[in-house]
């Protein structure tokens, strides 16, 4: 509680209430009204998250802004909310991107505008709930519920193959989630409570830990997504509308990584150490192999999707080398990747809105007709390939540093991304933006308007500031990360 | 104290029986244009029954008619929910039946006699009472399905329903007679004591139990005794399908509780194994076969089979948690089924049944509100939070896991995943596909209001499931712990 009102509840429910309001505007005749209400909701939703940052106590790793009420007494389930240095930044990121997505869809979406905007607002509230929930069932409810709006977004406003992508996305995620549910029920059976923080202290045998770890792994690895279960992501990204891709890449993937930090690692620390080799191996495969896969893509969205998988491999790598560099690097990489990949999908969206193609071959020489856009696109492409001075560099560098401390070859393999990442991003950039004007479509392009400029500018500034001065972010996560590492070092057997 | 006043726990049944007579006669007297009067009278009767049930509620367990009849919290709660679902069924099906010329006096009185049968089942405390209740219900349902005389499909399915139902009743009776042979009593309490004291004949009991379980499985529609379900659901007029699929499942739950749990609890080691097989098969066959259906009524039939498997999973956990979760599941299942079939009827018009999956195509463009309600219902059936279907599955899985049935839980989870696919398909049809006709949906005001309440209830109960869960737990606890 702060300022006398339950801040986290407001953060969760305000966007949802606005979402319902937007929905109430009805059909497309009221589309302008729906857009305005949605924008107001998104901006307010972002403003109410700011006190989380300003009022945050950086010295403690304990949960802050805690709210606790009885919810289902039958099963000892509580409405228990709270944030620490790990989750708070993700809430901010999510609220920020909701504003971006609403503005990005302002003109592009013409059909069923109210439903589109409502889906994003409701989803934003639900994702905030995922990050803030401290009760396992509450977490699960938000976790599953956020699938529904995303399913609709991909399926209703997506590309030609949207139905396949939407159903694949939903079922893939549901499979993992249901196994997680079994693990949560087992933990309830052992501890008599659904408190996540109680689970952290619960002693568990090695077999139990390994089984629990695998169950959680199924849920979170699908979301991240890690190497063998990543195949839904390119489909979902390609078919989703721009806003959907942005939220998927910027926020939804982080939910999986967050799950590892909140559940798998602290609940099953011994199993995490035991299976770290597997996690590191899968992460490195993602970094190297998926990086190579990205190189061969001819569809821009697919390319950025694969690049996301590759970058998320960095995040999981950083987590499972169990040192402060790796962990903080992973967190910074999560935030940075949120901005960079979100920005890249917006850039592709800008071009798609004009040319209605995502194929690299359909472009060429965009710089001639859209110089301002090309400059912004350049910055984000550089950030994606990890150029120093941009946010992409900080996280990657720290993870590589942490990996080298554990094993030189881990660091070496991870560092190849600096080559591959630069190769696939800049090669795409070159083919799309530079050179002679390829065709009439490109010749008739008009540069980005004020609305698009605003979005790009905000994102560009953020990416640069984070790259040059990451301290305000890292000081927030410090206490929590250290606490997690100390906790992980103690055996629970 | 006069004899009449000692009958107070059965006042609701007595009232209903009198009213059935009144409604039958009134319907004969009134011209058929004023059937609304009898319809309203039926609704008032149900309302009256609920008031009486609430007024005659006592804290504790009351036995009547030398132990043939019991009145406890569970019976009161289940009866109230039965009235509610019968009354909702009437609202949903009224205009559907009027258009098809089936809104007759017989329909109303048969509905009420089957309600009476369900009430007797719910309150039975003796195998004979249970059987009588079951037959009153079943015979009324056979007649209801056959009500559409000129439809060969409906007649065929009534015939199937009747023959298979009669066979199941035979199984049940045979099993009951074996139990009687093994224990020397038909009273639920006495049987339980005799077996607990080790005075029963074990071989006879287990033999009888097998027949009882088979009979129950028939009535519930659990695999491998499920063959009648899809045909009857498909063939019967949708209003009757809705009726068969909803309230009788509450009575069936009571039936299972009274027979398996209250009287044959000491034989749990035997019946739990049988139910486990039934549960897994039902979930598997139900969910997998549902995928292949193109008729939504058949799809719901298979989905019912799968839901019954889940319900049995709760029962076989053999704990208070398990029984109360099964009860919760039954209640939620009824709520969702009412909404699902109610939607089919709402979309149907004169001479047109919206029972094909394709009839739901593009519903979001024709009527966003109805599509949203159906979306809630479908996600609830699939067990996706924040809808209440999740908590139903959650509590059953929890109970089963506590009872140590990890492998059953994993099987249930995998089959629910498979099940999610065909529920999602409906959402897909409604939201992602273009409509086949742009005809406006004619929204009957009463059923539209009801379906909105129904759909929002699925959401609200999902956000606040606490009260209903507590009621279920208290009901089960009272009927089991107090003799």
Image (tube, grey):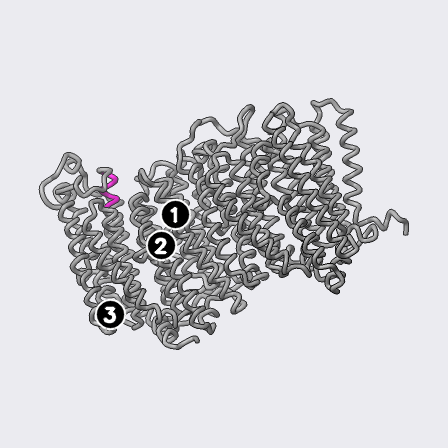
Alpha-carbon span between mark 3 and mark 2: 25 Å
Alpha-carbon span between mark 3 and mark 1: 35 Å
Pointers 3 and 2 in contact (C-beta within 8 Å): no
Q: Position of residue B193 (x, y in %)?
A: 75, 61
Q: Nearer the viewer, mark 3 or mark 1?
A: 3
Residue at left offset 46%, top offset 45%: A20
The answer to whether marks 2 and 1 sit on the same chain is yes
SS at mark 1 in the image: helix
How many other residues sit within 10 Å of disc 1, few (<14), some (14-19) or many (≥20)?
A: many
Q: Where does the magenta region start and end? A: A348-354
SS at mark 3 in the image: helix
The chain holding disc 2 is A
Which of the two residues, B360 or A115, is positioned nearer the viewer here?
B360
Q: Position of residue A358 (x, y in %)?
A: 23, 42
The quadrant where residue A207 appears: bottom left
Residue at left offset 23%, top offset 39%: A357
Alpha-carbon span between mark 2 and mark 1: 10 Å
How many other residues sit within 10 Å of disc 3, few (<14), some (14-19) or many (≥20)?
A: many
Q: Which residue is mark 3?
A: A403
User: Which mark identifies residue A252?
Assistant: 2
- The answer to whether residue B111 is left or right of residue A366 is right
Q: Quadrant of the C terminus of chain B?
A: bottom right
The quadrant where residue B170 appears: top right
The image shows residue A68, relative to residue A483, as above or below, that is above
């Amino acid at each position: 509680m702060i300022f006398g009102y339950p801040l986290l509840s407001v953060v969760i429910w305000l966007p949802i209430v606005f979402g319902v309001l937007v929905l109430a505007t009805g059909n497309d005749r009221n589309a302008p009204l729906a857009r305005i209400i949605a924008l107001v909701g998104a901006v307010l939703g972002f403003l109410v998250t700011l006190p989380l940052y300003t009022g945050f106590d950086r010295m403690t790793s304990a949960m802050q802004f805690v709210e606790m009420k009885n919810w289902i007494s039958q099963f000892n389930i509580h409405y228990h909310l709270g944030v620490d240095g790990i989750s708070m930044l993700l809430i901010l990121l999510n609220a920020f991107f909701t504003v971006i997505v609403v503005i990005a869809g302002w003109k592009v979406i013409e059909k069923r505008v109210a439903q589109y905007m409502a889906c994003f607002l409701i989803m934003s509230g639900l994702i905030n709930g995922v990050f803030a929930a401290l009760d396992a069932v509450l977490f699960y409810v938000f976790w599953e519920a956020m699938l529904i709006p995303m399913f609709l977004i991909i399926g209703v406003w997506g590309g030609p193959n949207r139905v396949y992508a939407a159903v694949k996305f939903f079922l893939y995620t549901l499979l993992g989630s249901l196994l997680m549910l079994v693990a949560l029920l087992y933990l309830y059976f052992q501890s008599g409570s659904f408190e996540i923080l109680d689970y952290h202290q619960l002693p568990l045998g090695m077999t139990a830990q390994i089984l629990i770890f695998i169950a959680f792994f199924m849920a979170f690895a699908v979301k991240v997504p890690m190497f063998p279960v990543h195949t839904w992501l390119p489909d979902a990204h390609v078919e989703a509308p721009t806003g959907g891709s942005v939220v998927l890449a910027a926020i939804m993937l982080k939910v999986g990584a967050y799950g590892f930090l909140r559940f798998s690692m602290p609940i099953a620390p011994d199993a995490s150490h035991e299976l770290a080799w597997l996690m590191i191996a899968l992460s490195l495969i993602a970094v190297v192999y998926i990086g190579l896969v990205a190189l061969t893509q001819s569809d821009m969205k697919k390319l950025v999707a694969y690049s996301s998988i590759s970058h998320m491999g960095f995040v999981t790598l950083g987590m499972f080398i169990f040192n402060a560099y790796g962990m903080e690097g992973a967190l910074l990489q999560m935030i940075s990747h949120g901005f960079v990949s979100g920005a890249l999908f917006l850039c592709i969206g800008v071009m798609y809105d004009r040319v209605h193609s995502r194929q690299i071959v359909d472009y060429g020489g965009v710089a001639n007709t859209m110089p301002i856009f090309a400059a912004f696109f350049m910055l984000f492409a550089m950030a994606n390939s990890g150029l120093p001075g941009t946010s992409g560099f900080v996280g990657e560098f720290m993870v590589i540093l942490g990996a080298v401390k554990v094993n030189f070859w881990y660091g070496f393999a991870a560092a190849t991304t600096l080559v591959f990442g630069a190769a696939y991003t800049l090669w795409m950039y070159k083919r799309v933006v530079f050179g002679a004007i390829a065709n009439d479509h490109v010749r008739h392009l008009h540069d980005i308007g004020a609305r698009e400029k605003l979005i790009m500018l905000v994102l560009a500034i953020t990416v640069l500031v984070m790259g040059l001065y990451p301290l305000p972010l890292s000081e927030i996560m410090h206490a929590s990360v250290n606490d997690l590492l100390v906790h992980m070092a103690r055996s629970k057997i | 104290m006069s004899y009449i006043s000692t009958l107070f726990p059965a006042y609701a049944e007595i009232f209903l029986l009198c009213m059935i007579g009144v409604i039958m006669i009134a319907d004969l007297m009134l011209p058929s244009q004023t059937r609304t009067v009898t319809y309203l009278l039926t609704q008032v009767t149900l309302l009256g029954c609920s008031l009486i049930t609430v007024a005659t509620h006592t804290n504790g367990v009351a036995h009547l008619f030398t132990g043939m009849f019991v009145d406890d919290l569970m019976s009161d709660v289940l009866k109230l929910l039965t009235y509610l679902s019968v009354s909702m069924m009437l609202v949903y099906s009224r205009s559907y039946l009027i258009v098809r010329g089936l809104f007759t006096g017989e329909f109303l009185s048969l509905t009420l006699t089957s309600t009476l049968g369900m009430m007797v089942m719910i309150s039975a405390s003796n195998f004979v009472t249970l059987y009588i209740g079951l037959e009153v219900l079943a015979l009324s349902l056979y007649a209801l399905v056959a009500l559409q005389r000129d439809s060969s499909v409906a007649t065929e399915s009534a015939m199937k329903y009747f023959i298979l139902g009669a066979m199941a009743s035979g199984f049940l009776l045979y099993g009951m007679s074996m139990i009687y042979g093994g224990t020397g009593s038909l009273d639920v309490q006495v049987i339980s004591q005799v077996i607990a004291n080790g005075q029963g004949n074990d071989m006879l009991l287990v033999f009888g139990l097998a027949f009882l379980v088979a009979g129950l499985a028939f009535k519930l529609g659990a695999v491998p005794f499920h063959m009648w379900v899809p045909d009857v659901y498909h063939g019967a007029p949708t209003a009757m399908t809705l009726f068969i699929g909803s309230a009788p499942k509450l009575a069936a739950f009571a039936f299972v509780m009274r027979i398996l749990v209250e009287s044959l609890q000491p034989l749990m080691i035997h019946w739990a194994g049988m139910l486990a097989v039934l549960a897994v098969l039902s979930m598997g066959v139900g969910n997998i076969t549902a995928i292949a259906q193109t008729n939504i009524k058949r799809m719901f039939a298979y989905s019912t089979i799968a839901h019954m498997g889940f319900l049995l999973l709760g029962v076989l956990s053999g704990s208070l948690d398990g029984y109360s979760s099964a009860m919760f599941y039954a209640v939620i299942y009824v709520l969702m089924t009412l909404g699902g079939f109610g939607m089919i009827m709402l979309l149907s018009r004169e001479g047109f049944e919206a029972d094909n999956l394709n009839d739901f195509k593009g519903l979001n463009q024709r009527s966003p509100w109805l599509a949203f309600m159906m979306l809630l219902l479908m996600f609830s059936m699939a067990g996706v939070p924040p809808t209440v279907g999740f908590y139903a599955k959650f509590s059953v899985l929890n109970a089963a896991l506590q009872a140590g049935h990890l492998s059953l839980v994993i099987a249930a989870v995998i089959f629910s995943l498979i099940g999610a696919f065909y529920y999602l398909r409906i959402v897909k049809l409604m939201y992602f596909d273009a409509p086949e006709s742009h005809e406006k949906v004619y929204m009957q005001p009463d059923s539209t209001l009801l379906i909105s309440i129904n759909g929002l209830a699925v959401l609200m109960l999902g956000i606040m499931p606490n009260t209903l869960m507590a009621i279920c737990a208290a009901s089960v606890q009272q009927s089991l712990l107090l003799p």
